[in-house]
Amino acid sequence: MNNLSFPAGMSLGVGLVVILSLASVRVSAQAGVDLLGSPIPGITAIGHHAIGVNMTLLATDRPFSDRQWRNRSALDSLDRRARRAMRKSERLRFISGFEGGIQVETPLLDGTSLVDVLGAETTWTLDDKRAVAELLADQKTQVNMDLRWVGWSRHGSKGGWAWSIDDRYSVSLEPSRALAEFVLLGPASSVFDSALLTDGTVVPVESLTNEQFNMIEQGIGPINLPAVEEMLGNGRFAVQHVRSYGAGFGLNLLQTRSLGLAIGMGARYYRGTGYYEVDADEQTAFAAFNRGFGTELVSENATLGSALRPAGFGVALDVAVRAEIAGLWFASLAINELGRMDWQGESYSLQNPIVDFSDWTNAGGGVFDLLNQGLAPTALFLQATPERKVVALPTRVRLNGGMRLGNRGKLGLELAAPLNDALLKQPTEIGVGGQTHIAGIHFMGGWRWRQDGGIRTPVAVIWAPKDRVAQLGVATGDLFSFLAPQKRWSIGWSYTRTLRPARDL
């Protein structure tokens, strides 16, 4: 068998190099005020943050403002021009620049002495790499990074609307023990029975020492090349990057002291630059990357466009309805990301052997560099067939309700769950918590249970004094993340500005 190598030019692009190199921080896909990891996004997602969460909030909640009931008789006493001027003066507009956050869950964070996150040249021993492979094996490593480049919202007496431009990076890895060892150890992995050293001796893999690890010439196994099916076991991994252009509105159908009813709707257009999915259980693999993503594909005849041409396109809809009783109790239902993505890429057969690496070297470097190289399509497959694939977006339902505490606070409960088995879906979550503001500082906090993730304590603080046009917020997905960093590590940020009413512009 030829020597094994991890080609230096191979890259899984933004998905594994950029995202995983940021694995010391977090935001949820719904997290500022929704991007800030709040416990109840359907309550605290205000302004343009309501896009992708609950569009009715554009009509029912005025960001960073106390609720004020209008005296109807006093309004009726005004003439048409005066009523119009009053409504115009009460309009609010908000805009934000760069905001977002990162969510990371990985066993690698529990043992960071073994992990060189930035990928600097570091000498790893055989024991180090075996320990990292053991941490990775059969455990999920998941990364979600959401960046909102710009957002804008308008709020009036009858409703509001908003738009935003967002990027979403998602990675989910759950490698088998064989694959984790192969990526990190190459010919010293358990896939092979023994290893041929540079001095001509053959040593069983289980008996290798650190000194012999640096002398490996090639791995020797019962078959010339291990099959992909054998390597993957029951593992799976997926990578995706999409940019979305979203807009939506919320409309008050009825607004009185006894009953309020609002509806909301939003739409998003997606342009995808990278998609990679391997599912050993289903015996399927598919990849689609544009030239700018930096990943080598297997098929010489594959033409996925230039660096400027996306590899995928999609459209999604969000719908929501909200009711409020006596200005006190409220409940809402929202369904997000009803839609699909159309990718032009390649399909792979899991029955083929892995590629025959040449010039394999026991290079140092960070664990994420090794994962990036070892999980790329050219690292696992020899053949590919150009294919167009339409995949469902991760549709999600949110049901929440609660009560207002005067004009300054809210308490509530939310249930969020996936409606399909799409790639990189978010698990079922139940959140309880609230928000209030004191002296220009808004506080949000509570508890959130996540399926297979335990209970977390998200907390957000937003500085928003009445006499200032800027609002700055920071948050964490779990106040006690330091107790279990391998499960709970997150941070988010948000910066918005209030635009003056139209008459003052």
Image: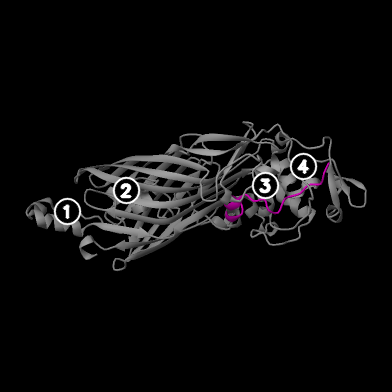
Residues rendered magenta in the picture: 1-18
- Residue 57 is marked as 2
Residue that carries the numbered disc 1 in the rendered image = 70
SS state under label 3: helix
Based on the picture, tell me whether residue 9 belongs to the magenta stretch: yes
Write down the quadrant of residue 396 in the picture: top left
Q: Which percent across, then down, holds residue 63?
A: 31, 56
Q: Which percent across, then down, holds residue 186?
A: 77, 47
Q: Earlier in the sequence, mark 4 or mark 1?
A: 1
**Are circles 4 and 1 on residues that touch, CB within 8 Å?**
no
For the C terminus, the image quarter is bottom left
Residue 379 relative to residue 470: left or right: right
Amino acid of disc 2: Leu
Q: Which percent across, then down, holds residue 294?
A: 61, 51
Between the C-alphas of marks 4 and 1, the distance is 74 Å
- What secondary structure predominates along the stretch shown in magenta? loop
